[in-house]
Amino acid sequence: MPTCCHVGLLDRRAIEAADGEDASPAAPRPVAKRCNAAAACIDRDLYIFGGEAGGDLVPSNGDPAYVDMSDKEMARWAEPEISGTVPGPRKNAAAAATAGRIVMFGGTAVDAEEAPVVLEELCVMTVLSPGVLSSVVNPEVSGPAPCARTGAVMVEHRPGRVFLYGGFAADGRALNDAYVLDVETMAWTRVYNGHPDLVGPTGGCCLLRLLSCSIGAVCLAKWVAT
């Protein structure tokens, strides 16, 4: 069973070439193909976490990645350095970046018998410098925390806060609820808890569905305005 999450970083900084020199970039590092990965962009860097390939979770020995996008002909990838507790392999986790941190919640992992497990795990990674992260898994939090879920969506609500919506519970139920996490105080706030029958069979995976729903809009309007 793999022991850590395949993590990659995409860097979009410009390459500064010396005048008069042929600054041909080095050959790119191969990147393991995957789907259902989590991704978050902070500053000009894109980080990817986990995912699956061929029906299996991307393992710990997969090739994490860092790439400079200024060269449109070639992507050069590198492995970010992660200290602290490294999140384990998973797919369909929700992730977003805010205030110099990357927040990831939930997803689906596998247990020792290779059975799927829906996670209730919160991971907070502080970006110390491009490609250098300090990671904490399940930090102490306050407030009503979300239940285990996979396939949820997460976005930055405002600097220092991330918004988590929906997904599927461990029993397969589509979830119709929303939470905000303040990454400075590590406090969860439940801002919406709708009836699950109002959610289509795709679960909570569409944030726009919630925001366009009149019931959800009424419930959220006063809170979002504060």
Image (spheres, rainbow, N blue to C red):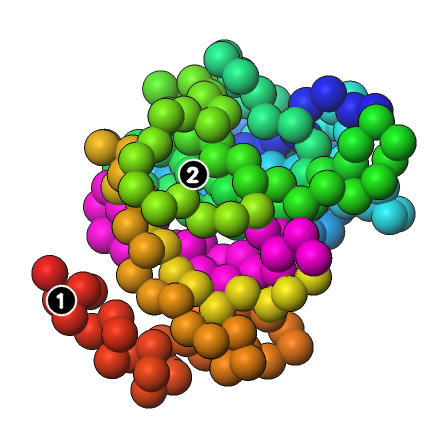
Q: Quadrant of residue 203?
A: bottom right
Q: Is residue 17 above or below residue 194?
A: above
Where does residue 193 sit, x and y in percent of width and height? 39, 67
Which residue is nearer to you in this view: 193 or 13? 193
The kind of secondary structure element at disc 1 is helix
Where does residue 133 sit, x and y in percent of width and height? 45, 21
Q: Which residue is mark 2?
A: 103
Which residue lies at the image location 73% right of the left edge and 41% below the top edge? 117
Residue at the outermost left position = 226
Which residue is nearer to you in this view: 189 or 134? 189
> Tags 2 and 1 in contact by the CB under 8 Å rule?
no
Type of amino acid at the residue the image marks with label 1: Ala
Q: Which residue is mark 1?
A: 225
From the viewer's perspective, is 162 left or right of 53?
left
For residue 156, say whether it is visible.
no
Where does residue 73 sit, x and y in percent of width and height? 63, 46
Where does residue 146 sit, x and y in percent of width and height? 45, 49
From the viewer's perspective, is 60 left or right of 83?
right
Q: Is residue 216 above or below residue 78?
A: below
Q: Quadrant of residue 58?
A: top right
Which quadrant is home to the N terminus? top right
Magenta highlight range:
149-171
Q: Earlier in the sequence, mark 2 or mark 1?
A: 2
Q: Quadrant of residue 5?
A: top right
Which quadrant is home to the C terminus? bottom left
Spatial separation of the CA atoms under disc 2 and disc 1: 23 Å
Q: How many marks?
A: 2
Which residue lies at the image location 34% right of the left edge and 77% below the top edge? 216
Magenta stretch holds residue 153: yes
Which residue is nearer to you in this view: 210 or 13? 210
Q: Residues within 10 Å of mark 2 (few under 14, many from 20)?
A: many
The kind of secondary structure element at disc 2 is strand
